[in-house]
């Protein structure tokens, strides 16, 4: 599955990579992983199918809210949440931030709400959507400006122009990457557009058999998914020095960016010395 756990009997390990961005408009959380309620009551919140298949490691200290608190912030400091898509392992923490406005692509919201197929009902969990009145959805049809050879939806309500959606449909219909401009270039969290870092190898893309199967099982549009993977490879090759591309579940990319091993919560931020 992950390409680094030996054997086929031992379970591989993946992460749920979320980002916390400090802006003038308050904290912005990008994707939410699993939340406190998932940790406390996985069986009422998540599908038995995925609990059995993935056996997630539910640790309260690894939830976004607990790590944000370790950094010295409160839940209310998170003013905005930007979601790559509504799958259970990205939307689980929404309920821990009832004050935040939640941004997503309109197609994602509309399609998830339909609860159309059996698999849709396993992956899109209304039990995790207690914040629905705070959701803001953005159309992609007719919208979009060029961004490094891809299209981007800019001007998310109340957010600085340094944060934008890069629609990457395929895994779900309204799936999107989230780009964040930093002083020295861009970060692009591509969500589940790909799963293994070697899939981004331009010359010889490679994916582990387990993750290849998992992606096929969950894809809503195969052609779009593979096209977008190719676009991401090209982006990385041409603009890799300006845009750091990474996905939601790859442990290596997570460890390189966070500077921590997987399963280690963020270090508490050092408080300023009292005056
Ligand atoms: Zn995912």
Image (tube, helix red, strand yellow):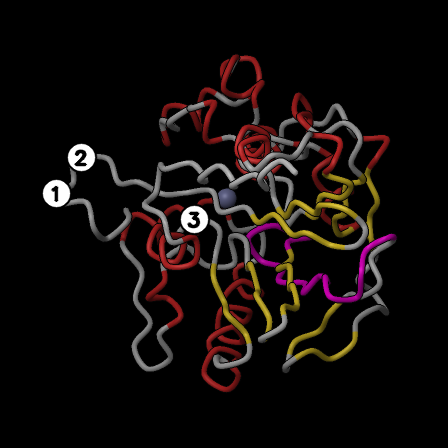
For residue 35, side relative to residue 157 (left or right): left
Quarter of the figure with the C terminus: top right
Q: Residue at x 42, y 24 (%)?
A: 59
Whether residue 117 can be seen here:
no
Task: State yes or no: discs 1 and 2 in contact (Cβ < 8 Å).
Answer: yes
Q: Secondary structure at mark 3?
A: loop
Q: Residue at x 78, y 36 (%)?
A: 100
The magenta region covers 158-175
Measure how far apart labels 1 and 2 are at the Cα level.
6 Å
In the image, residue 111 sits, relative to residue 40, either above or below, namely: below
Q: Secondary structure at mark 2?
A: loop
For residue 61, side relative to residue 36 (left or right): left
Residue 72, percent from left and from top: 60, 34
Q: Residue at x 47, y 22 (%)?
A: 60
Residue 94, percent from left and from top: 67, 31
Residue 76, percent from left and from top: 75, 31
Ligand 1 closer than 8 Å to the CB at disc 3? yes
Please tell me the numbered disc located at residue 10: 2
Measure how far apart labels 3 and 2 are at the Cα level.
18 Å
Circle 2 crowding by C-alpha within 10 Å: few under 14, some 14–19, many from 20:
few
Whether residue 51 can be seen here:
yes
Please tell me the numbered disc located at residue 7: 1
Magenta span includes 162: yes
Q: Which residue is mark 3?
A: 249
């Amino acid at each position: 599955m992950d390409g680094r756990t030996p054997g086929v009997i031992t379970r591989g390990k993946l992460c749920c990579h979320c980002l916390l961005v400090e802006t003038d408009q308050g904290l912005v959380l990008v994707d939410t992983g699993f939340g406190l309620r998932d940790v406390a009551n996985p069986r009422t919140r998540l599908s038995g199918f995925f609990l059995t298949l993935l056996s997630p490691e539910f640790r309260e200290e690894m939830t976004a809210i607990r790590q944000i608190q370790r950094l010295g912030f409160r839940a209310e400091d998170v003013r905005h949440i930007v979601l790559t898509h509504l799958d259970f392992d990205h939307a689980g923490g929404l309920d821990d931030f009832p004050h935040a406005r939640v941004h997503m692509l309109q197609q994602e919201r509309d399609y998830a709400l339909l609860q159309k197929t059996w698999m849709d009902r396993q992956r899109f969990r209304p039990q995790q959507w207690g914040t629905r009145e705070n959701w803001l959805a953005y159309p992609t049809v007719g919208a979009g400006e060029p961004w490094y050879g891809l299209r981007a939806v800019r001007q998310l309500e109340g957010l600085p122009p340094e944060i934008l959606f890069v629609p990457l449909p395929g895994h779900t219909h309204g799936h999107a990457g989230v780009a964040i401009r930093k002083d020295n270039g861009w970060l692009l969290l591509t969500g589940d557009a790909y799963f293994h870092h070697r899939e981004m190898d331009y010359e010889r893309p490679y994916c582990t058999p387990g993750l290849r199967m998992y992606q096929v099982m969950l894809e809503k549009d195969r052609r779009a998914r593979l096209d977008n993977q190719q676009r991401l490879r090209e982006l990385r090759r041409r603009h890799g020095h300006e845009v750091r591309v990474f996905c939601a579940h790859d442990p290596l990319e997570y460890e390189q960016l966070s500077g921590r091993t997987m399963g280690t919560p963020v270090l508490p931020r050092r408080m300023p010395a009292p005056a």
